[in-house]
Image (cartoon, rainbow, N blue to C red):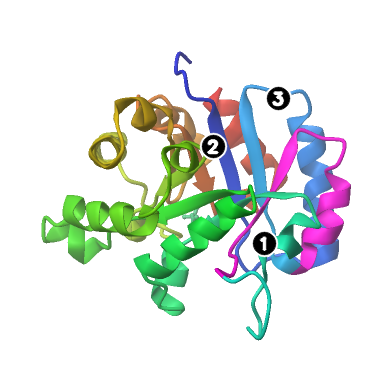
Amino acid sequence: MNKDRKLIIAGNWKMNKTVAESLDLVRGLKIELANIKEVDIVICPPFTALSEVSKAILDSNIRLGAQNMSEHNVGAYTGEIAAVMLKEFSVRYVILGHSERRQYQKESNELIAKKAAAVHAASLKPIVCVGETLAEREAGKTNQVLETQVRGSLVGLSKDQITESIIAYEPVWAIGTGKTATTEQAQEAHAFIRRVLVSMFDETVARRVRIQYGGSVKPSNARELMSQPDVDGALVGGASLEARSFADIIKNSI
Ligand code: PGA
């Protein structure tokens, strides 16, 4: 594949896997994925499994991500997890603003922007999720929603920080539904997000930011999606819970 951005494929395990189950999955992934260098491979287990998973992947090409992080550094924030705590387990990436958190935890673009700043302050990399609902798409508002989310969730980041950020385009109607965006819909949305980045920053910066597609990515559709000029990886939910399917998505993308 002839793209100057390295593909990044991340597994978002969501609220799945005990520690024992996580270690089982990692064992399988290490065998399936050994020697793959063409793709940045990231897994995002639940917080409770980060410690053990972190040890289990030490000698591998798999990197660790978290599914959320507090915008605060320390203090009286019951139930929250700070950057310094994630760094203890060599976490490198943090998913921010997933549509499930936007929906169930009412996370706003403003909050996500604060979290993104905290992630960068800790020298971690955010995976910032954006995406429209079915109603928004059907009302012809996809671009408007994406622009508001991209601008609002990334506001205040420097050029260096945005270059080190990953954006995940995840149409809400495609998440966990088995409905994937067509390659044309994905490419169109990714190209639009890149144009927003040009207007917020500049061409050079926009060309360097990696934009993942997420929403029912499977081994059977990964190759076609990844072959699109503005699709630079995937954020995988359901299909990342099994070693074979996650590995096949990665192998089919190279
Ligand atoms: P899915 O989830 O692959 O199960 O559709 C993707 C995501 O929510 O990140």
- Left or right, 111 with respect to 40, comes to left
- Residue 95 location, x and y as percent? 55, 56
As drawn, is 242 to the left or to the right of 35? left
Q: Quadrant of residue 37?
A: top right
Q: Quadrant of residue 49?
A: bottom right
Residue 67's x, y, as percent? 60, 61
Q: Residue at the spot x=83%, y=43% of the render?
A: 57
Residue position for label 2: 219
Residue nearest the viewer, comparing 193 with 201: 201
**Residue farthest along the left direction in this orientation:** 139
Question: Which amino acid lies under the numbered mark 1 shown in the image of this protein?
Answer: Ala
Q: Amino acid at mark 2?
A: Pro
Going from N to C along the chain, the mark reached first, 2 or 3, is 3
Confirm whether the magenta stretch covers residue 212.
no
Secondary structure of the residue carrying numbered label 3: loop
Q: Name the residue tied to disc 1.
A: 83
Q: Is residue 70 magenta?
A: yes
Which SS class for mark 1? helix
Identify the disc placed on residue 70: none
Left or right, 246 with reference to 194: right
Q: Please report contact status of discs 1 and 3: CB closer than 8 Å, yes or no.
A: no
Q: Is residue 94 visible?
A: no
Q: Nearer the viewer, residue 189 or 126?
A: 126
Amino acid carrying mark 3 in the image: Ile
- In the picture of the structure, the residue carrying the numbered disc 3 is 36
Give the number of the mark in front: 2 or 3.
3
* Region in magenta: 48-71
Q: Give the mark toward the camera: 1 or 2.
A: 1
Q: Are marks 2 and 3 in contact (CB under 8 Å)?
A: no
